[in-house]
Amino acid sequence: MTESPSRGDITVVPGPAEVSAGPGPRPVPTTGHGPSPWRRLPALALAAALLTLVVVLSIGVGARWFPPGEVWRVLLHPDGTEVSAVVHDLRVPRTLLGLLIGSALGVAGTLMQAVTRNPLADPGLLGVNSGSSLAMVIGFTAVGTDSITGQLGWSFGGAVLAAVAVYAVGSQRTTGTTPIRLVLAGAAVSAALLAVVQGMILLDPIALDRFRYWAVGALAGRDLGVTGAVTVPVLAGLLCAVALGRSLNAFALGEDSAHALGARPGLVRAGALVSITLLCGAATAAAGPVSFLGLVVPHLARRFAGADQRWGVAWALVLGPLLFLGSDVIGRVIDRPAEIQVGVVCAFLGAPVLIALTRGSKAVSA
């Protein structure tokens, strides 16, 4: 009986041709560790049920208290009352946007850690947050952007340009882009852009006040127009991430092994970067830079999914909005009638969760 060779968290099972013919193309890797699919599905269904509960709480709970029966009635039958206006004009758009942003940041973080093979990488490493920040400051100071729609355009444009700059700096004509070079380029470009941002807001107190509110990360005041504006890039990024799942499994073995398995590392990396830019750019444009979510969700996803990137993306789709919307609900009720922005709550909850994960005895590496 032939023993299957193991490479880290991925096990490659040799077929008859490989055993008899010696070296040659190897089959696509399968997950060697982590729960079986029969155990993953019930756990994922339970997480989806918890997400449904959080969605109900997001619609029914807010800075102002309304009876649950009344909220449910006006949700199904709008009647123009104050309760109906709060539910349909504020809470429903906020909940839908929270679902999109949480999914986007969770999946973007999963892709970023898979592409860089670095468990400490987050989507902001691609320069998206710093590019959005610089674009927003320029919009505040040079144009006087006040509308949410205008802020979306400036922020998303800055995120895309920063991601392109990072990819250009981190790539070479002969060797292409490597994970190490991409991380270094992202850190360098982000530092340079943030230095410009700090200089500009120090010279303009009005821009500083506007930028501080945006930079905290918030869902308050976003209507269905904002949700509709970010839906297309988020869905496009999510579809791209799902399509890359199988190739990312081969990519996790290293570029040489990925080539042998029929994958194209350069194309996989480029597709992942496009997906990350769409997801993180849209999320940052809609709610500002949110810390820790894109870093914590991939670690939680690996706890349940193992090393299989396809299951990791599926778990990130559920865990991202679960944590993000849950943080938003906590921020609404913890200091009534005022609110604490979701970015603050995410950072407050994300830091101890990340510490607990890294100190756990069963931590799963990227």
Image (spheres, rainbow, N blue to C red):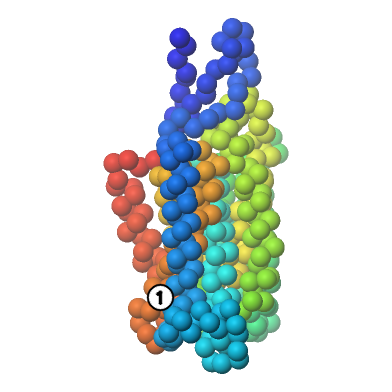
Q: Is residue 137 left or right of residue 174?
A: left
Vertical order, 243 against 79 (above or below): above
Picture coordinates of residue 152, whole percent (x, y)? 65, 73
Pick the front one: 110 or 180: 110
Q: Quadrant of residue 203?
A: bottom right
Picture coordinates of residue 30, whole percent (x, y)? 53, 30
- Residue at left offset 52%, top offset 88%: 83
Pick the front one: 258 or 329: 329
Locate the C terminus by quadrant.
top left
Q: Is residue 102 left or right of residue 246?
A: left
- The residue pinned by badge 1 equals 331
Picture coordinates of residue 282, whole percent (x, y)? 62, 64
Vertical order, 116 against 318 (above or below): above
- Residue at left offset 40%, top offset 45%: 303
Q: Quadrant of residue 204?
A: bottom right
Q: Residues within 10 Å of mark 1 (few under 14, many from 20)?
A: many
Locate the N terminus by quadrant.
top left
- Residue at left offset 30%, top offset 45%: 360
Is residue 134 in view from this perspective?
Answer: no
Amino acid type indicated by mark 1: Gly
- Residue at left offset 46%, top offset 77%: 60
